[in-house]
Amino acid sequence: MIGRGKGLLFLALAWVLLAHLSSHSEAASNYDCCLRYTKSIIPPRVIVGFTEQRADEACDINAIIFFTKKKLSVCADPKQSWVRRAVHLVSQRVKKM
């Protein structure tokens, strides 16, 4: 009887651990946030797309996340003039397609 109790306890602990690990990996994949901005200016010709991160949703800072031809994600400050200009140019390029 004691062996069965230990087996159930082990099974319960394994289930709790599995649930805990899966919740952490899901949270990390759904909320990949920019924590700081790039200090480099990204030329618009290498940008293939962008998305907006909003501080009032799941992340701490507002950011524009640029996606480059080399499949990099670059976090930029939306208040910077070069960022606003790049967003405008990429948006115009997409409208022409």
Image (tube, helix red, strand yellow):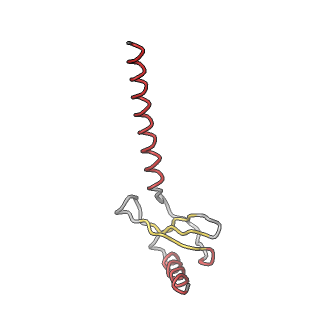
Q: What is the x, y in percent for residue 17?
A: 43, 34
Q: What is the x, y in percent for residue 30?
A: 45, 55
User: Residue at 48% across / 74% down in the picture?
Assistant: 80
- Tell me the quadrant of the picture where the N terminus can be found: top left
- Tell me the quadrant of the picture where the C terminus can be found: bottom right
Closest to the observer, 78 or 92 = 92
Closest to the observer, 8 or 30 = 8
Q: What is the x, y in percent for residue 19?
A: 41, 39
Above or below, comparing residue 78 to residue 21 in the picture = below
Above or below, comparing residue 4 to residue 24 in the picture = above
Q: Which residue is outermost to the top?
A: 1
User: Residue at 39% across / 23% down in the picture?
Assistant: 9
User: Residue at 48% across / 69% down in the picture?
Assistant: 51
Place residue 14 in its image quadrant. top left
User: Residue at 47% across / 56% down in the picture?
Assistant: 32
Above or below, comparing residue 6 to residue 75 in the picture = above
- How many badges with numbers are in the image? 0
Place residue 41 in its image quadrant. bottom right
Closest to the observer, 89 or 26 = 26
Q: Which residue is outermost to the left?
A: 56
Q: Which residue is outermost to the right?
A: 70
